[in-house]
Amino acid sequence: MLFPYLDIILRSTAVYFFMTIALRIFGKKELSQLNTADIILILLISNSVQNAMVGPDTSLWGGLVAALVLFVINFTIKKLTNKYKILNDLLLDKPEVLIHNGKLEFKALSRLDISNDELKEAMREHGLEHFSDVKLCMLEIDGTISVISEDKKHLKQTHYKRKHNHKNFRK
């Protein structure tokens, strides 16, 4: 082989894009709230893809090349998503409206699997009791739920860290 680390570069690139697609499909929003099972999953995934990246090369240089490739790809993807909107739309999530002017967005809540209890907890953290008190409630791209109150004198915003919850939203 002309360049002994070309195999590692190609393998690492393939694993990076596979993981990006997998996280896009399976919901990267959940990563903002890591629980024990999520951490175990990440550790097991990293262990399972290590050999796929470095192959039979278990040398220090092989590992460093794989890590460097991952850093370079990640840096490049961030630059490209900032520059090209179409790539940004393809790879990154968008904030989602959950409540607008006191009206719940049931389709979004159902699709995002956000329960009534979870939404009310985020509102209580902001000091709000009723949906009608909410001007805007959003699920942000980092997985937090932000709430802006209807109180026009004191517009406040808080961030509620979303817990992974599989209960369906009830009307």
Image (spheres, helix red, strand yellow):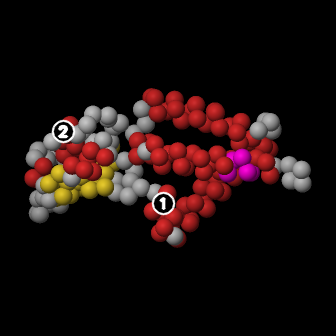
Q: Mark 1 points at which residue?
A: 90
Residue 55 sits in which quadrant? Answer: top right
The x and y percentages for residue 110 are 27, 44
On the picture, is 31 further left or further right than 45? left
Residue type at mark 2? Arg
Label 1 Cα crowd, 10 Å radius (few <14 / some 14-19 / many 20+): few
Give the main secondary structure of the magenta stretch.
Answer: helix
On the picture, is 37 further left or further right than 48? left
| Residue in view at x 34 percent, y 57 percent | 95
Q: Is mark 2 on a helix, strand or loop?
A: loop
- Whichever of labels 2 and 1 marks the residue nearer the N terminus, that label is 1
On the picture, is 78 further left or further right than 99? right
The x and y percentages for residue 28 are 45, 46
Label 2 Cα crowd, 10 Å radius (few <14 / some 14-19 / many 20+): few
Give the residues drawn in magenta, as a range.
Answer: 9-13
Q: Name the residue under label 2.
A: 170
- Front-lying residue, 104 or 149: 104
| Residue in view at x 9 percent, y 53 percent | 132
Q: Is mark 1 on a helix, strand or loop?
A: helix
Residue 116 sits in which quadrant? Answer: top left
Residue type at mark 1? Leu
On the picture, is 25 further left or further right than 153? right
Residue 166 sits in which quadrant? Answer: top left
Query: Is residue 45 visible in the rendered structure shown here?
Result: yes
| Residue in view at x 38 percent, y 58 percent | 94
**How far apart are the alpha carbons under marks 2 and 1?**
31 Å
Name above or below for residue 115 compared with residue 156: above
Name above or below for residue 56 compared with residue 148: above
